[in-house]
Amino acid sequence: MTGKIFVLGATGKVGQPLLRALAARDAAVTAFVRNPAKVETLPGVTAVKGDVKDTAAFAAAVQGHERLFLLISDPADVTIEPALAAAAAAAGVKHIVKMSALDASDNDEVGSIQYLHGVAEKAVMAAVPGVALTILRPGYFLQNLFSRASEIKFSGSLATCMGGAQMAHIDAADIAEVAAVILTSPADEYSGMSLTLTGPQARSWDDVAAAMAKEFGRPMRINHLDPAAYIRFLTGVGMPRKMAWMLAQVETLSRRNYTGNSFATGNVEFVTGRKPRTVEQFLAEHHDAFV
């Protein structure tokens, strides 16, 4: 059995299923969270109150752990993750699994999510020389559709500026399964690897709308907008302006990279031994959230 595992982001889209997957593997886990009451009661999982911006508190809490799942909710401050990684290494952590993003690169548009994750990746690598490091680069989360549930329910449409780009949307539960396997495997098995994680098949948003129409039994359409109009749409429904720009940048860069390019990896199956969930499986499982 591996040593104790320290998990950040434990109440988020990936963190919650990760805790369940680790508990199913009889792992000893500490979830470092601002509100321990939000952590599901699971065997082997202990919730500890803390904030990732308090490096001293983190350094004290991570003592005695061998593995760290490194995920912060706000990628804008690229100094946080390397500071946490360095503190973890000083405390004796031997293997870090860092969440990043598809196409992370410090050569991309400054301020974009891809750029921020690319900068953070390099900073973490520089902060922990000699520590086993695995980077996960998931694509578009199917769980992001939950934040658009009202739009889907009441307008029968979904706005995007991604055009005809084909993305292999991924279920966060599959990302969690990958992380759980890596965190409970010998560190050298996945050390020094960046794993791009996708669903099984690249699909355009029009394809996803067709799957929604079939599952929900009503017409669904994609409202294709240009990036500026998409930002206006997002801010019009209450999204902060800078966040709307960042989301539009993700979609614009995806349109650049994945139009006419059906890109999907086999990395979920490589790690877990099974294929990732399809769009149809996700919609069926979460049917009630959208009707």
Image (cartoon, rainbow, N blue to C red):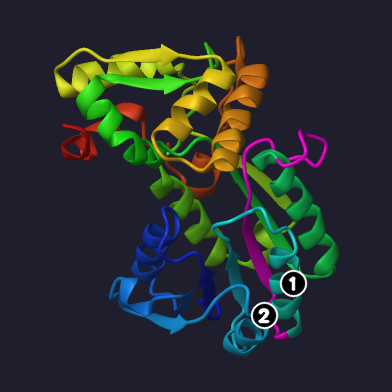
The residue shown at (52%, 67%) is 184
* Residue situated in front as seen by the camera: 69 or 123: 123
Residue 147: percent from the left, percent from the top?
A: 35, 40
Q: Secondary structure at mark 2?
A: helix
Q: Is residue 200 visible?
A: no
Q: Point out the stretch of residues depicted in magenta.
A: 91-111
Asked which secondary structure carries label 1, the reply is helix
Q: Residues within 10 Å of mark 2 (few under 14, many from 20)?
A: some
Decide which of 195, 190 is in the foreground and name it. Answer: 195
Q: Are marks 2 and 1 in contact (CB under 8 Å)?
A: yes
Which label belongs to residue 83?
Answer: 1
- The image shows residue 191, relative to residue 266, as above or below, that is below
Q: Amino acid at mark 2?
A: Thr
Residue at (40, 14) in percent of width and height: 223
In percent of the image, x 45 and y 19: which residue is there? 203
Q: Position of residue 74 (x, y in %)?
A: 58, 56
CA separation, marks 2 and 1? 7 Å
Query: Is residue 64 part of the magenta span, yes or no?
Result: no
For residue 159, what is the image quadrant? top left
Residue 277 position in % (x across, y down): 37, 36
Whole-percent x, y for residue 90 in the image? 76, 83
Decide if residue 270 is on the left or right side of residue 159.
Answer: right
| Main secondary structure found in the magenta portion | loop
Q: Is residue 268 visible?
A: yes
Position of residue 74 relative to residue 25, above or below, is above
Q: Earlier in the sequence, mark 2 or mark 1?
A: 2
Q: How many marks?
A: 2
Residue 291, quarter of picture: top left
Q: Nearer the viewer, residue 151 or 28?
A: 151
Disc 2 target residue: 55
Residue name at image x 58 percent, y 21 percent: 228
Q: Quadrant of residue 284?
A: top left
